[in-house]
């Protein structure tokens, strides 16, 4: 939600929500499949599930971190441009007062 509030890009938010739901589904599969099995048997039989869940978690975390960095960098850039415009307009108003 933080990324959506900063970026206002619904497509990214929907993508991350879909990946998070998929990760939730793999976590539920852990629960359903893993309860009756011992840990070594579970790891041996469902190694792909462990890898999939871990990869989904990494993708979601890295994606959110990258999006936050882009949004914050854009906000900082926009702020710097606004500051430059304000300083320039102040300079021009001061210059106009001295030339009149």
Image (cartoon, grey):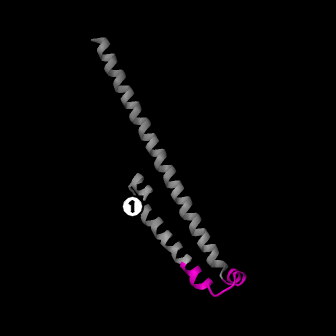
Q: Is residue 96 magenta?
A: no
Where residue 56 appears, as percent x and y from the top left, is 57, 69
Q: Position of residue 77 (x, y in %)?
A: 45, 40
Q: Quadrant of the C terminus?
A: top left
As drawn, is 48 to the left or to the right of 4? Answer: right
Q: Principal SS element in the magenta part?
A: helix
18 in relation to 62, above or below: below
- Tally of numbered discs: 1
Q: Is residue 16 left or right of residue 47?
A: left
Local secondary structure at mark 1 = helix
Specify start and end residues of the magenta stretch as a single range.
Answer: 28-45
Q: Which residue is mark 1?
A: 10
Q: Quadrant of residue 28?
A: bottom right
Quarter in which the N terminus is drawn:
bottom left
Q: Is residue 32 left or right of residue 1?
A: right
In the foreground, 45 or 31: 31
For the point 41% across and 63% down, the residue is 11
Which residue reaches farthest right? 40
């Amino acid at each position: 939600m933080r990324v959506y509030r900063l970026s206002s890009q619904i497509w990214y938010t929907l993508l991350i929500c879909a990946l998070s739901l998929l990760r939730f589904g793999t976590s539920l599969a852990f629960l359903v499949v893993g309860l009756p099995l011992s840990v070594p048997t579970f790891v041996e039989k469902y190694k792909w599930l462990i890898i999939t869940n871990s990869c989904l978690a990494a993708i979601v975390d890295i994606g959110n971190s990258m999006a936050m960095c882009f949004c914050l960098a854009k906000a900082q850039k926009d702020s710097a441009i606004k500051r430059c415009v304000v300083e320039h307009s102040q300079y021009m108003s001061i210059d106009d007062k001295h030339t009149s």
